Amino acid sequence: MKKLRVVQVGTKHDHAADATLTLMQMKEDFELLGVVEEDALLLKKAKENPDYNSVNFVSFEDAVALKPDAFLIETEEKLLVPTAKKVLEAGFNVYMDKPGSEDKESFAEICRLAKGKNLTLFLAYMYRYNPAIMYAKVCVKSGELGEIISVEAQMNCSYLDPNKRKWLGSFKGGMMFFLGCHLVDLVVSIKGVPDEIIPLNSRTGIDDINSLDYGFCAYRYKNGISFIKTNATECNGFNRRQLVITGSKGSIEIKPLEVTVGEGRLVKKTYLRKTLGVDNKWADNSVNIDFPPEGRYNRMLKTFAECVRGERENPYSYDYEEKLHSIIIDSCK
């Protein structure tokens, strides 16, 4: 098995340090050649962060000269797409953190660019590789749950820092853009493209902050309504992150979506409850399934490595990513 030689660009994204740590842990799949941080203040901060203790910091030009197999883009959100475009134009495979540009056309452009060059464009939606969610999707695809009527997804936070909530105001849609993108992906990957998108984004006004820190959007389908919610100021919000899939023959509830195990912030476990239809409508014949702890990003990065090595096809096509991004932007109105 070929070990992927990779370079990470950026340290400001919320997932940046976690990506670095996971890459260094997955020594059978990755060799981290270096990290690029072109912002002097962010570079100083990264060098003081113990997560980057064993990292070699390099310039972008030096990174390109190393001819890595792929680049991982972990810049702040507004720089994700411009950086990915620069990397793709240079002819390298791309792993890019979510959700991409606020502009549909600029995101569509990198999808076309990657497709035209036959390069991997891999979006880092970690819940795609959450073992409980993957199991739920198998149940959906097999028909075990019958016709899917609705998908309900929540990704809340237990009172984000006020400065972080102010920062949400730099994006149209606020929380819907920042974290709601994960949930839109879950709805669309299970139910498909909605007939109508009904954004109901709002603000709590807590701490006199005016950003849209309460995201909510409904999606109309011919057989029902699905919805997503993402609140930055919810008591016990992290533990209330959940996915509910209801079908004509059964339902699945995953709550919470993940729980941190022990002291390691990267290691999570998940719980799932599956219920199939019974004659006695008040009876409970649900089955609880616990999934063992695993690294939050390991399965996702493993899949990326396999895609770049040509061992498997990217589970999410260029066209899917472009359509998903368009729906995310429409959900931010």
Image: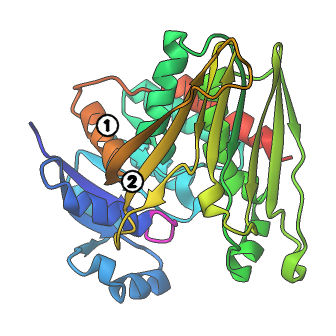
- CA gap between label 2 and label 1 equals 13 Å
Q: Position of residue 102 (x, y in %)?
A: 71, 50
Asked whether residue 90 is in view, the answer is: no
Question: Looking at the picture, which amino acid does disc 2 mark?
Answer: Arg
Q: Position of residue 264 (x, y in %)?
A: 34, 69
Residue drawn at x 40%, y 39% as measured from the top left: 131
Q: Which segment did they paint magenta?
A: 9-15
Q: Position of residue 45 (x, y in %)?
A: 43, 86
As drawn, 215 above or below 158: above
Q: Which mark is residue 274?
A: none
Nearer-the-camera pick, 229 or 329? 229
Q: Secondary structure at mark 2?
A: loop
In the rendered structure, the answer to whether residue 160 lies left or right of residue 25 reads: right
What residue is disc 1 on?
303
Q: Residues within 10 Å of mark 1 (few under 14, many from 20)?
A: some
Residue 205: which quarter of the image? bottom right
Mark 1 or mark 2, which is nearer the start of the sequence? Answer: 2
Tell me, yes or no, whether the highlighted magenta stretch contains residue 319. Answer: no
Nearer-the-camera pick, 276 or 14? 276
Q: Residues within 10 Å of mark 2 (few under 14, many from 20)?
A: many
Residue 273: which quarter of the image? top right
Residue drawn at x 9%, y 36% as measured from the top left: 1
Residue drawn at x 37%, y 34% as measured from the top left: 120
Residue drawn at x 56%, y 29% as measured from the top left: 286
Question: Looking at the picture, which amino acid does disc 1 mark?
Answer: Thr
What residue is disc 2 on?
296
Q: Secondary structure at mark 1?
A: helix
In the rendered structure, the answer to whether residue 283 lies left or right of residue 37 reads: right
The nearer-to-camera label among 2 and 1 is: 2
